[in-house]
Image (cartoon, rainbow, N blue to C red):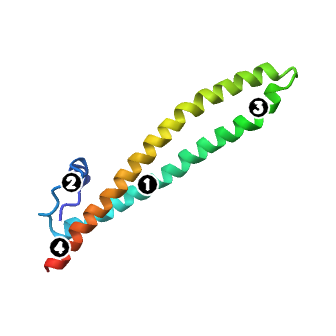
Amino acid sequence: MNGTMDFYEKYLKDKFRNIDGLSKDDLSWLLLVHDKKIEYFKEERKMHFGAFALVAVLFFIILPQALSDTEFAFPLLLLEGLLLLLIVPYVFYYAWYENRLRKIESYYFVILEALNSKDEKE
């Protein structure tokens, strides 16, 4: 069994297309490593969503004070502008991240299918 990350990265780069010739042990190892990678990305997804949600909530909490006629209205408006500048591109980044995670998750089933076909042949 080849248990190096280079082995995994090689097949990930190829989108796990040519894994039919691998042994059952290699496929099991790939499945395990890929599952851990998915777990990592899911945890990172939670952090990204949390950061996005916090910035969005902060934007709407500050908005009434920024629109009021107080001495702090102008600095709060500047802060609102900065938050808006952060939120808009982050929406696109989060969408890109989510699509990437879904693609990586789909590879799990490719490996699982190859492993199941090995089990059926034996």
Q: Earlier in the sequence, mark 2 or mark 4?
A: 2
Sequence-wise, which precedes: disc 3 or disc 2? Answer: 2
Q: Amino acid at mark 2?
A: Phe
Disc 2 or 1, which lies upstream in sequence? 2
Badge 3 is on which residue?
63
CA distance for labels 1 and 4: 28 Å
Residue at screen point 17% across, 60% down: 19
First in sequence: mark 1 vs mark 3: 1
- Give how far across and how far down residue 15 sits, in percent: 24, 51
Q: Which is closer to the viewer, label 4 or label 3? A: 3
Q: Residue 118: give its label.
A: 4
Disc 1 to disc 3, C-alpha distance: 35 Å
**Residues at marks 2 and 1 touching, judged by CB atoms closer than 8 Å:** no
- Residue marked by disc 1: 40
Give the distance between the C-alpha atoms of the residues marked 2 and 1, in whole angstroms: 19 Å
Q: Earlier in the sequence, mark 4 or mark 3?
A: 3
Quadrant including the N terminus:
bottom left
* Mark 2 closeness class: few <14, some 14–19, many ≥20 residues within 10 Å: few
Separation of marks 2 and 4 at Cα, in angstroms:
19 Å
Identify the residue at image location x=65%, y=38%. Answer: 55
